[in-house]
Image (tube, rainbow, N blue to C red):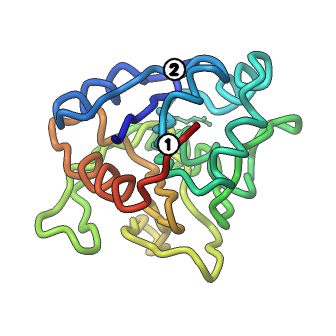
Amino acid sequence: MLRVGVLALQGDFREHVNSLTALNVAVQKVRNPEELKTVNALVIPGGESTTISMLAKRVGLLDPLRKFVKDGFAVYGSCAGMIMLADEILDGRSDQETIGGIDITVRRNAFGRQVDSFETDLALKDFKNNFRAVFIRAPWVERVGSEVEVLATYKTENNQEHPVMVRQGALLATSFHPELTNDNRIHEYFVQMAKSVSRVNS
Ligand code: GLN
């Protein structure tokens, strides 16, 4: 049976719990390695990636999280969660570590100060209708590896186009925060992904 963990060290994990609960999925907050063992999919929330990374290290979760990804469990990260899943970060703190797993380079706080936070309607690949995307001091993707599928891009005012939703195998990441809207389609998409991976954690 699918049991989705939500990494609950810092950030908007409650909103992810609510979105998943609305989909009738069994949800478990993950705050330590023992709780990680009880789930077979994981969501990493938005928040502050430097803090999430530091806390994960402190509670001994960083390596178990890396193993969780390597073992092929489904993981979804929004915003700071995207940064945590990226193999490479630009404008990170010099000592900032990630879990990694998605072969992308992300730039933290990429949209700049003037446009700290904004909302826009995004076309998502394979989704029928646009998605109201909430960006808050969001990262964007500057490089994607050959195994990475780009599911949405955002075009800046000077016509630069950057991926803001990507997938690599069982790993999904968005620059924006679907958990802050009532539109649960991305969570639903992730739950379907997790079910098709359908791994047993023991
Ligand atoms: N700027 C944050 C970071 O670097 C991410 C912001 C967010 O998750 N809304 O982690």
Mark 2: C-beta under 8 Å from nearest atom of ligand 1 = no
- Checking the image for residue 8, the label placed there is 2
Instruction: Kindly indicate the quadrant of the structure image that contains residue 49.
Output: top right
Tell me the quadrant of the picture where the N terminus can be found. Answer: top left
Mark 1: C-beta under 8 Å from nearest atom of ligand 1 = yes
Location of residue 4 in the rendering, given as x and y in whole percent from the top left corner: 40, 35
Residue tagged 1 = 79
What residue lies at 36% left-to-right and 19% top-to-bottom?
Answer: 14
Q: What element carries label 1?
A: loop
User: In this rendering, is residue 43 above or below 129?
Assistant: above
Near-viewer residue (95 or 13): 13
Farthest bottom residue in view: 146
Near-viewer residue (179 or 109): 179
Location of residue 71 in the rendering, given as x and y in whole percent from the top left corner: 65, 53
Q: Label 2, label 1: how many angstroms apart (C-alpha)?
A: 15 Å
- Residue 12 horizontal side relative to residue 99, left or right: left
Other-residue count near label 2 (Cα within 10 Å), few / some / many at <14 / 14–19 / ≥20 = many
- Residue 13 horizontal side relative to residue 48, left or right: left
User: In this rendering, is residue 155 above or below 76?
Assistant: below
Closest to the camera, between mark 2 and mark 1, is 2
What residue lies at 48% left-to-right and 52% top-to-bottom?
Answer: 199
User: In this rendering, is residue 109 above or below 12?
Assistant: below
Location of residue 145 in the rendering, given as x and y in whole percent from the top left corner: 65, 76
State which image quarter holds ligand 1.
top right
